[in-house]
Every structure is written in C-alpha cells, then in structure tokens.
Image (cartoon, rainbow, N blue to C red):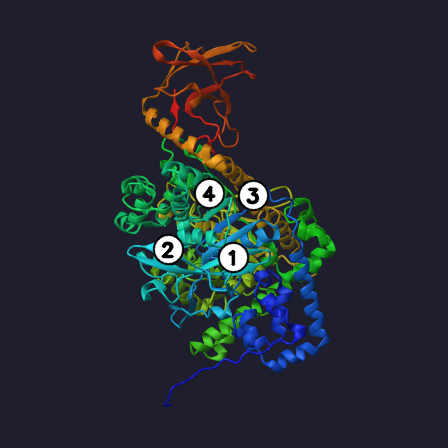
Amino acid sequence: MAGTLYQLEVNPKLPARLARLEEISNNLWYSWDRPTRLMFARLGQKLWGAVGHSPKAFLKRVDQHRLDEAAKDPVFLGTLAQVLSAFDNYHENRRPEHGHGLPEGGLIAYFCAEFGFHESLPIYSGGLGILAGDHCKTASDMNLPFVGIGLLYRQGYFLQSIDGEGRQHALYNEADFDDLPVTPVLRADGSDLKVTLRLPGRDLLIKVWSTRVGHITLYLLDTDIPGNSEADRHIAHRLYGGDRTTRLEQEIVLGMGGVLALAAMGLQPTVWHINEGHAAFLILERVRALIKAGIDFPAALEAVATNTVFTTHTPVPAGHDHFADDVIRNYFGEFCKDVGCDLASFIALGHIDQQPDFNMTALAIRGSRFQNGVSRIHGDVSADICSSLWPQIEPAENPIAYVTNGVHVPTFLSDLWHDTFDRVLGPAWRQRLTDAQCWSEIHAIPDHTFWSVRQSIKAQMLHLVRYRVTQQHVRNQSSQSHIDRLLRLADPENPNVLTIGFARRFATYKRATLLFRDLARLQRIICNPERPVLLIFAGKAHPADKPGQEFIRRIHEVAQMPEFEGHILIVEGYDLRLARRLVSGVDVWLNNPIYPLEASGTSGMKAGLNGVINLSVLDGWWGEGFQQSDEGANGWAIKPASSIHDDERRDQEEGRSLYETLQDRVVPLYYARGPMGYSPGWVHKAKRSIATITPRFNSQRMVGEYVTKYYGPADHQWRLKSADNFAAARALAEWKHKVQQSWPKISLRRADSPQRRLGFGESLRIEVAVRLDGLSADDVAVEMLLARPSANAKSRPPRRLFFDYRGPGEDGESLFVLDLTPEVCGKIDYRIRAYPHHEHLTHPFEMGMMLWL
C-alpha cells in the first residue's frame, strides 16, 4: 500500500483506585512475588503474554475499559489490596536481616555485565546474570546497603527459534526503554544525568538509568544517546555483541563509567565487588580519582585493592577475557599520562604466565585483596589457574578462596509449595531459609500430599512445554496429528511419565548429547511402554558457537527418529519463565559436564529445593551438595572418570555410568509404585532433596558468607587504610616496594643441628638464621608447619608455630628461635618457611613471596 505509515500508541489512564499499579510496575519486586504477576495477568492474559510479562509495558497497552472495570471490581480490588499490603510490608521493613555486618555509612557496589531478574528486563544471557540477579534480590531481602551497576542494552541476549531441521536461529529485538522497568536518573535541575568518559581521541557520553529491586537500586549505563557518534551509540547496544573492540569498550564503560556514575550521584561505596572480570577497569578509574587527590600510583592502587572483592566464574584459562597489548596501549595511553604510570608497568598489571595479552582476571586480582571462586571445586581450580600471580605460594594457600553459589528461594520455589510449607514448617519458614532443622521437618509432610503437590507442579510445567512445542512445530509446518504424537507423553492431565530435564546453555563442556552415545541402549531405557521416560531439552548456543549449535541439531535429529518419537522434546526459546517451570516441574534434573569445568551451576539447586532429584556428575556445587547417609541419598552422582583417560575414554566411562544409573536406579525407583499410585522410595528421596539442598544452597546463605568473609572485612580495611589521608595505604605501598627489592637476596639456614628423636615432654630448640638484606626482623614471619606424615593437608591442616626473633646472629644474619614441645608421640613431620609480614596485609600471602628452609 502506497504512502507513509505513521504509528501512534494510545496509552490508557490509570483510575485513581489503581494508581499504585504504576509504582509496582517499576519495582522488580514483582519478579519474585508471583501474586503480583498473577494480578496483572488477570487484567488480560493474552496481552500479558504478548508484552513478555512486563507490568510496565502491559499498563501502556491494556484497554481503558478493562482498567475501568477493574477499578469497580471488588474481587480485583481485594487482590490489589493484598498485593499492596505485601509490597508495603516488605518495603517498610528496613531492619537488616541478622545485621548486615557494615557500620554506618557502609555501601556495597556490585558490578556485573549482565543481570537476570525477570524476562521483562532482558539484559542477561545465562547463569552469570541469573546469579547476579539473585545476589541483588537477596541483598534487598537482607536490607543490605547495596547498589548494582550494569549496562542497559538495546538488544539483550537473542530470542531463539529452531527450524524443522534442528537449526538454531537467533533473533534480536530492539528494546523500547519505555517498556522496561527503568527510569532515567535526574540531576537536581531535572535534566538527565550523564557522565563523560574519555576514549581515544574523543569523549563518550553515558546516560544513567535506574531500576528498583525491592529495597536496593540497580544503575544501568546507556551509550545510545544524542551527542555520541553512531559507532559509540552502539557500544552498549547488544549484550556480548560486536567485535573485540566493542567488547573492550563495553568493559571500559561498565567499569570506569560505572565509577564515574556513582561519583556523579554522590554515592561513596566502601566495598566494591567485581562479579567476573568484565568490570575490572573500575580499579583504574578509582585509582585515577585518588591520584587526583594527591596520592601516588602505588599507594592509590593499594588503597583501591583493599576494599575490592573479585569473584571469578570461569573454570578454564581460555575463558578469561583478554585483549591485545597494542589495543590496551591505544586505549590507556592517556590514562597512564594522567596517573603518572609508565605504559610497561601498566600493561604488566594485566599479564599472567608470560602470555602476550592483557588479561582482565589478572588485573582484577592485582587490584583486589579478596578473591573467590563459586564452589569448593572451582575455588581449587581457580587457585591453580591463577597460581603464577603468587609464584612462591602453593595454590592451596594462595588468597583465592570460595563462596558456593546459592539461589533465591522466593524466585524459584514453586508457589504451590507455599501453603504446604506454611502448614508443616510454620509460617516462619521464609525467615529460616538457612535453618537445617526447619527443613528437616519436610519429612513430616504426608507422602500423598507431597506427591500431589509435585504432580500439580509437573502439570504446570507440561502445559507450558506443550504450548511452546506446539507453537514451534506449527511454525515449522508440522501437522496436528504429528504434534499430537510428539506430545502424547507430555500430558498435564495424567503426568505419570518419568520426566527428565536438561536445560542450560549449550556449551560443549556441558555435553548435552552424552545420553546419545549408545542409541540402542537409550531406546531400551526410555522407550519401554511399561516404564516410559520423557526427556525434555532446552537451552541456547551462542550464535558463534557452532559445536554448541550442532548439539541442538543432533538432539532434534534423534528426537525425530521413529523409535524415539514422543520420548525426546527440545523446546525453543529458553528464558527465565521456561526455566522456572522446568526446574520445578520435571522429576529428574540431569547435568553431565566435563569435570572440573562446571564452576558451580545453579539450576540443580533450583530443582532440588522443589523436590526434583538431581542426577549429575560430581562437579561444581554437586560436589558439595550430594549426600549419602543412613537416611538415603538426596540424588544420584556420576563419579568423574580418571584424568588419565583421553576425551573419548572419559565420555565412554561416564556415559556408561549414566546409562547404568538410569536403568538400574532411576527408572525402577520411579515406577515402584504402591497402592496409592506413587513410589514411596521416590517421595522419600525427593523430600531428602528439599531438606538437604534448600538450607545450604540458597542465596541468603551465599550473600551472608560474602558479608562475613568479604564485605565486612573489606569495609573495615577501607576505613583503616583511608584514614589520615590514606596514611596506612601509603605506608603499606612503601613497605611492599622495600620488600620486593630485598626479597631476592633473602636466605634461610638451619643454625642448630637437627635432632631425630625426642622423649615425650621434652623440648627441642630450633634455630633459623635469616639473611634479611636490610629488612627488619618485623618484616618477616618465620614459621613451622607441624603435621603427621600421613595427614591430609585439606582435611587436617598442619599446625602453624611461629619463631621468635632473638637478635643478631653470625655474619649479619638474624636469629629466630622456636622451643618445640610435641604434644603427641610417634612420627612427626615439620617444615620451616619465611614470608613477608605486615600488620596491614589483608592476606598473609598476598605478596606471593615465600622461602622454604
């Protein structure tokens, strides 16, 4: 049709009695309060789905007459009153949960490249973002002084479709910021807050937006504004989009721009948390600010590091972001002039293991004093990967520790559990999430009640799966009869087929197709008409990840084979809504990554707290979560194959273990049904899943650990090091320089004659002579490690005994003495070492220096 097409959007006006719907629509509290979302859905189910479950977009498009009707409907007004009561009660409770561990004036700034709160704010791609969202929600629940900083993307992660050949297609939608629960941050004069960031040869304008997340605020940075060049407007256009230059510029905007934005708003964090290395450039902008205040570069870096927390989520060296040195020189040449740092020294901040590129993890570690992985296994892996940053320290003793991830229970616990938990655990269970005794009462739920709730949750999941699969196959021109055959086992009216879920990012190390190594054996396991099994797959592969996309195509191919028809479904469009349904509704949650490449994984935690039983390789969180006791196991574990095997042998061994577990344990237990129509053994194991996983792997425990281990100490260190114009930071930086100059010349020797036998109750004097090369005796600690010969250093750490300085020895040496009186008989091993010591060190080994006798 000829002529220009003009568009006009007519927005309804909220009746006075519904006015507070706008307030609720701009607070992501709705993302974990299901009654609020249901209230909006009741105003128009079809429109609610069309706008991606966004309350703000919904209120812009709903018919005026529908709002007018609702304003007169006593039932809807009653529902609104209940929602507003819950909303107000939550926000009026400003008491810190269990005390937040920070003194007055404390503030935590949490930086991340993505945040996953809800499908209505699509600025996330996967596990990192969902974890960041859960962290923020929990900070709100605990009333922490907390702000988040991220990027506001026009294009979040892609929308996925799968065609009739199993090929993944990526579609990017342009977000209308007016439809998102975000508002511009304004200056005192009412204008939009913008900050200016210097890039090579130009200034970049950054607009600051905000969104409420319960009690806390998330600030989002936007470069798509007038005044920037077309290229610069696209810097924050797409999540993880563009080339390496765009990726670098995104990380500069996130880190350095985020610091500038907080300063412009008058916010002064006392703790800075870098969640993955993307935001590590914040270290540099903070250093620049301190140098402008008159502090030299080493002292500024020391001060910045003292209250910076860095969490790594990457289990392989290649996964850490890195950029070519020449590119870094181009982007940070002006910065180095500003701060008085030569380029070579600056580049060295990002080098690790003599690799030629600038590594963001190396920068994050050198610019922080608190570092952690996200599970016990991952903490060990990360300590090993980054061990060269502390070259003389054993990986087990370097500063990298761990805080195992957790999940936000109000977001991922099915609402169908709430009434049952209220009745059996008592209404206070929401405040007792970390109380193992509370959750042990799960076993008091009658089996038939437990099974009934599980089946209802499963039916909800199957309704959504049927809808998504039907839409997918209708678009791909499948006949209705074929669709009916595909969905014959996914029956929400009769949800009695064992259903196994596998939904996550289709990265190659997650091995989505491990089950398909022996199709004949798989057919015998899942296609038995007496004990059928339904496998549901969902997830996205990165558009550039061709092997990951091939996994999707292979699953589709097997699902189309006549012998597997109806037993395998792959559901397109994996998002938070589908994730919530799957993790709560399937019977078994499958995870078979290559050990030890699963940093943590959180989907299994979400499944476990809903009574779904985990079947997983003992990697990531499951290495801690799996429990076998006299009361039975809380799931099934696949032991990783020996590291001596090649990839093919490893997959063969672990695939066989997976088949055997399914065939011999999972399927028989599910179908061992009694007269009531369910398996008592299955119900017992599902209860064990909830009782053991919920109190240990919820985000309240996780954030509580961050507060205790990192946020509180970091805040304390900042106040200590920044007092008196950063006197302690300056002194520590000078001391470290002195030690670095002298350490290569320091030596140890045994000054006494070693003794091999000693009577019980007798003492042994051990003398060590140390050549200090100008350092004082107070600058070093001389230490003995005492242990049994067969002691495991992890389960039974050696006893640490310190030597006393006894004055000068021979030839300019210093004499250190320890009087040892063993408290046990038998063989004892001991070793002696020395390392730098200063009262203001955050970690005793942070300098990476140690000498062994």
Q: In this view, which residue lies farthest toward the left?
A: 326
Q: Which element type, helix, strand or loop, lies under badge 2?
A: strand
Judge by depth and name the residue closer to the eye, 15 or 621.
15
Dot placed on the residue nearer the N-terminal end, 4 or 1: 1
The image quarter in which residue 849 lies: top left
- In the drawing, what numbered circle is on residue 551? none
- What residue would you read off at disc 4? 308
Label 3 – label 4 distance at C-alpha: 13 Å
Of the two numbered discs 2 and 3 on the same chain, state the one appearing first in sequence.
2
Mark linked to residue 218 = 1
Of callouts 3 and 4, the N-terminal one: 4
User: Where's residue 659, x and y in %?
Assistant: 48, 53
Q: Residue at x 56, y 45 (%)?
A: 106
Q: Is residue 50 above or below residue 705?
A: below
For this view, does 95 lie left or right of residue 788? right
The CA distance from mark 2 to mark 3 is 32 Å
Q: Are marks 2 and 4 in contact (CB under 8 Å)?
A: no
Instruction: Give the mark, 2 or 1, whose residue is nearer the N terminus.
Output: 2
| Residue found 67% across the figure and 48% down from its top | 432
| Residue pointed to by mark 2 | 197
Gap between marks 2 and 1 measured at Cα: 20 Å
Q: Is residue 341 above or below residue 47?
A: above
Residue found at the far bottom of this picture: 2
